[in-house]
Image (spheres, grey):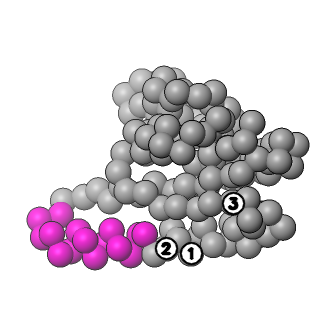
């Protein structure tokens, strides 16, 4: 295993996913890719307003990923890649994994419950169904 992908959103489960990725990176001497996906939603009628909100979210996410890089992975800095993507989270995770020959995706489960998940779907479920590689879901 040479390349591990962690989908990070700042939640407690995604922090646990980071910890698991660190263990696996040490065990297999693997590179870790940590990505955050933003998808601004709302009734945006003005493109400039939408773009401004998107840019602000990207900047905030980049700062958060810098904290991850200098925190959890401070001693593995040459083996970590961070990136902020924009779009549908499940689709972007799978696309990134395929483009970068990722061998394992680690993602947190939101734990929405059966009824909510039935109606809302879940990113982790989407990734499990569409990924080309194994997916470890942290619960």
50 drawn magenta = yes
Q: Which residue is mark 2?
A: 60
In the depicted structure, whether residue 37 falls above or below residue 136: below
Q: Earlier in the sequence, mark 2 or mark 3?
A: 2
On the image, the x and y values in percent for residue 108 come to 63, 41
Q: Residue furthest left?
A: 45
On the image, the x and y values in percent for residue 61 come to 51, 68
Q: What residue appears at the point 40 percent right and 39 percent down from the top-left corner? A: 91
Relative placement, left or right, of 120 versus 29 is: left
Q: Nearer the viewer, mark 1 or mark 3?
A: 3
Question: Is residue 16 among the parts visible in the rendering?
Answer: no
Q: Which residue is mark 1?
A: 63
| Residue extent of the magenta highlight | 44-58
Q: Are marks 1 and 2 in contact (CB under 8 Å)?
A: yes
In the depicted structure, whether residue 134 falls above or below residue 70: above
On the image, the x and y values in percent for residue 131 come to 51, 29
On the image, the x and y values in percent for residue 38 come to 41, 57
Q: Which residue is mark 3?
A: 80
Judge by depth and name the residue closer to the eye, 122 or 59.
59
Q: What residue appears at the point 55 percent right and 55 percent down from the top-left corner? A: 35
Judge by depth and name the residue closer to the eye, 129 or 28.
28
Relative placement, left or right, of 120 versus 19 is: left
Q: What residue appears at the point 43 percent right and 57 percent down from the top-left corner? A: 85
Q: Residues within 10 Å of mark 3 (few under 14, many from 20)?
A: many
Q: CA distance from mark 1 to mark 2?
A: 5 Å
Q: CA distance from mark 2 to mark 3?
A: 19 Å
Quadrant of the rendering where the N terminus is positioned: top right
């Amino acid at each position: 295993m040479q390349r591990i992908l962690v989908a990070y959103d700042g939640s407690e489960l995604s922090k646990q996913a980071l910890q698991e990725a660190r263990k696996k990176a040490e065990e297999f001497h693997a590179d870790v890719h940590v990505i955050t996906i933003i998808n601004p939603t709302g009734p945006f009628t003005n493109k400039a307003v939408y773009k401004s909100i998107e840019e602000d979210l990207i900047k905030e996410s980049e700062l958060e990923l810098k904290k991850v890089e200098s925190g959890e992975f401070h001693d593995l800095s040459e083996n970590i890649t961070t990136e902020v993507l924009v779009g549908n989270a499940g689709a972007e995770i799978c696309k990134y994994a395929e483009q970068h020959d990722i061998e394992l995706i680690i993602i947190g489960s939101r734990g929405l419950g059966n009824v909510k998940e039935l109606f809302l779907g879940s990113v982790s479920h989407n990734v499990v169904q569409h990924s080309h590689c194994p997916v470890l879901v942290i619960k």
